[in-house]
Image (cartoon, rainbow, N blue to C red):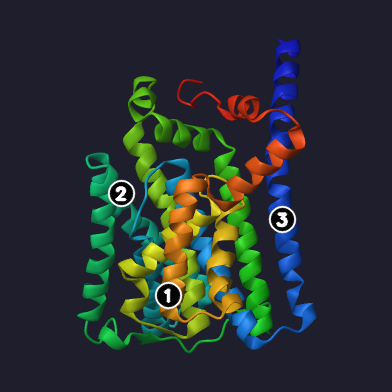
Amino acid sequence: MSESAASQGRHSTNSAIPALRSLLPVLAVLTLIALVPLLSPSNRFLSLAISAGINVIALYGLSVLFGQTGILSMGHAALVGVGAYAAAILARDFGVGFWAALPAAALASAVFAMIVGVPSLRVGGHHFVIMTFAFGQLLAIVLTNGGDYTGAATGLDLAGPVTLFGADMSDLTRYYLMVVAFVTAAAVASWAIINSSYGRTLRAIRENEKLAASLGINVGRHKIGAFVVSGIFAGISGVLLAHFLGHISPSQFSSFPSIYLALMVMIGGARLIEGPLAGGVLVAFLPEVLNLDPVQSRIVYGVCLIAVIMLLPDGLIGGIVRALRAAFSGKPKQETEQRDAAPSEARQ
């Protein structure tokens, strides 16, 4: 019995080391990002970086849903909007501050995500994508026609300061560092989900839903669970966005912003822990680097998405990792591809 326990302990330790190695590059990059204020960047740069970081938090939730479970949602921005409006209404009607609004908004987004996920038990593929797209449009219509309660088309304002241990976090540099801390927490949480037994179950559903069900996996419950997890990430992102902008409106959370979130996670790579971070930063700063107007940036995004789908199905980071692996392995391409073709986790 003791030898069996010892062997299991060695197996878990050996499997945990490669998993931890996948997280270290993300933590290293986030550490460098946290040091950016030392370079005295402009307020515009910090604002773009904060917006990118808030998107990355939502993208980590979408990566659990899409990358691990294989369910693509075009209504993820609507879940961010639920969190943002929950924070705004709580602040206006009950005087609830930033930190108290975080769990409430995350819970509200999780509940709405669960409602959105219920049709996925019966509808799949492009039919479900259309349904989530319609959910985003429906939420925008409801918020626009909500009268004074939702601020109608003009939206709601948030005037309360964000404080932490007595320090005013409304300062741009402090808010930037706080967002980086939230991004780090989201990355670690996503990494923990990916490398847990729950994450392996989600990937089994993604690869072969019928086979997973035949093995005794409750597919419906795990699908809804993935939606709830993605909703929690989206709700936290919404609270950060609402307090950063100080004003929210329905147009910010319609279906078209959801398309941009899906674009980010596809470009970066939904199945790797580095993907949401890379996709969020790239899509946020690419128009600024290339000096593109909104119309030109949409064209570039479309071209990038087509290129990624055709050439890099695992996303930009996945393509880079595959290229580096092939370059440093020194083995023929065919042998490398055979090594990468692992059996489905459902069969495992």
Point out the tag, 3 or 1, that comes first from the N-terminus: 3
Q: Is residue 90 left or right of residue 139?
A: right
Residue 306 is situated, as x and y percent measured from the top left of the image, at: 43, 55
Q: Quadrant of residue 149?
A: bottom left
- In the rendered image, which residue does mark 1 sit on? 87
| Labels 3 and 2 touching (C-beta < 8 A) | no
Characterize the local packing of mark 3: few (<14), some (14-19) or many (20 or more) Cα atoms within 10 angstroms: some
- The secondary structure type at the circle numbered 1 is helix
* Left or right of residue 334: residue 137: left
- Identify the residue at image location x=49%, y=83%: 245
> In front of the other: label 1 or label 2?
2
Determine which residue is flagged by label 3.
27
- Above/below status of 108 relative to 322: below
- In front: 126, or 292? 292
Q: Position of residue 136 (x, y in %)?
A: 29, 65
Q: Quadrant of the N terminus?
A: top right
Residue linked to disc 2: 117
Q: Position of residue 260 (x, y in %)?
A: 42, 65
Q: Quadrant of residue 42?
A: bottom right
CA distance separating discs 3 and 1: 29 Å
Q: Nearer the viewer, mark 3 or mark 2?
A: 3
Q: Amino acid at mark 1?
A: Ala
Of 61 and 289, the residue lying toward us: 289
Left/right placement of residue 100 relative to residue 210 reads: right
* Chain-order first, disc 3 or disc 2: 3
Q: Nearer the viewer, residue 227 or 108?
A: 227
